Image (tube, rainbow, N blue to C red):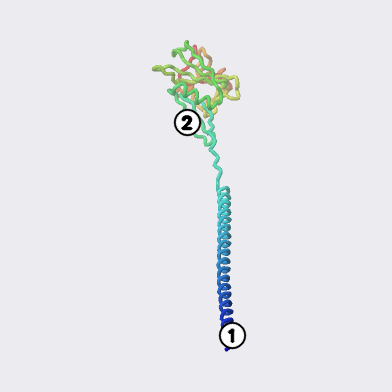
């Protein structure tokens, strides 16, 4: 055989090897491309998934805030209870203006506690002084512009609430009455319709007292239209 014929198989073999190598490179490249594609898709999917999770969390957070705002009930602290004051035998009555219930400021309460309580109810400050010439001995007195005077007597080195007096005040609009509506300016007819009383003429005028001897006062005359000028209960400082 000639050299030309011998070279053909070798050439064909060489070409076959080159073709095989190219195919191998192509297959390898194809796998690499697929791998890169898979990695890129995975990254993209994870990014999308993370983004969706962040959006979901943001939405959830917004919804939570919206829910919080929607569901939150504004609690308004209850208003401070307002009281009015009424005269009573051997005491004063605190009347709850919301429900009409009452609490008693009874005789025997310490001075500071009594004055602070009444001052808060009336929203007025009293004038405080001592009268040493009373028949019951020295009495400390707290007087308000509405005509109310509270009397305190010292017992065991403590001043205690022992009586009250109602007189014509500087501000008649703030005058106090009993729970029955009786006060300075009420008539004898009105007084007798609310209480059983006895009337005697004394150096003070037409003096009256209730059957239980817990309320006392003075009329400015003897008839049914006579008006109360003074009203008191407990220890007093009247000069006869």
Residue 167 drawn above or below residue 194: above
Q: Is residue 198 visible?
A: no
Instruction: List the residue tagged with mark 1.
Output: 3
- Residue at the spot x=47%, y=12% of the render? 134
Q: Which class describes the residues within 10 Å of circle 2: few (<14), some (14-19), or many (20+)?
A: few
**Residue 184, image x, y percentages:** 56, 22
Residue 138 drawn above or below residue 14: above
In what element is the residue under mark 1?
Answer: helix
Tag of residue 103: 2
- Dividing the picture into quadrants, the one containing residue 228 is top right
Q: Is residue 149 visible?
A: yes
Q: Real-space Cα distance between discs 1 and 2?
A: 137 Å
**Residue 25, image x, y percentages:** 57, 72
- Residue at the spot x=53%, y=15% of the render? 205
In what element is the residue under mark 2?
Answer: strand
Residue 65 drawn above or below residue 108: below
């Amino acid at each position: 055989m000639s050299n030309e014929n011998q070279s053909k198989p070798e050439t064909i073999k060489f070409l076959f090897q080159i073709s095989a190598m190219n195919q191998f490179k192509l297959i390898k490249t194809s796998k690499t491309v697929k791998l890169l594609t898979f990695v890129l898709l995975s990254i993209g999917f994870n990014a999308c998934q993370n983004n969706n999770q962040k959006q979901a969390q943001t939405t959830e957070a917004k919804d939570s805030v919206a829910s919080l705002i929607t569901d939150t009930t504004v609690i308004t602290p209850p208003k401070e209870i307002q009281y009015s004051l009424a005269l009573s035998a051997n005491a004063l009555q605190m009347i709850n203006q919301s429900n009409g219930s009452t609490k008693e400021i009874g005789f025997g309460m310490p001075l500071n506690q009594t004055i602070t309580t009444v001052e808060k109810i009336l929203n007025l400050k009293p004038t405080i002084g001592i009268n040493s010439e009373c028949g019951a001995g020295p009495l400390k007195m707290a007087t308000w512009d509405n005509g109310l005077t509270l009397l305190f007597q010292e017992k065991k080195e403590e001043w205690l609430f022992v009586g009250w007096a109602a007189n014509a005040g500087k501000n008649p609009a703030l005058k106090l009455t009993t729970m029955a509506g009786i006060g300075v300016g009420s008539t004898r007819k009105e007084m007798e319709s609310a209480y059983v009383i006895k009337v005697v003429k004394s150096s003070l005028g037409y003096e009256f007292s209730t059957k239980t001897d817990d309320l006392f006062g003075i009329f400015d005359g003897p008839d049914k239209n006579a008006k109360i000028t003074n009203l008191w209960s407990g220890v007093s400082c009247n000069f006869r």
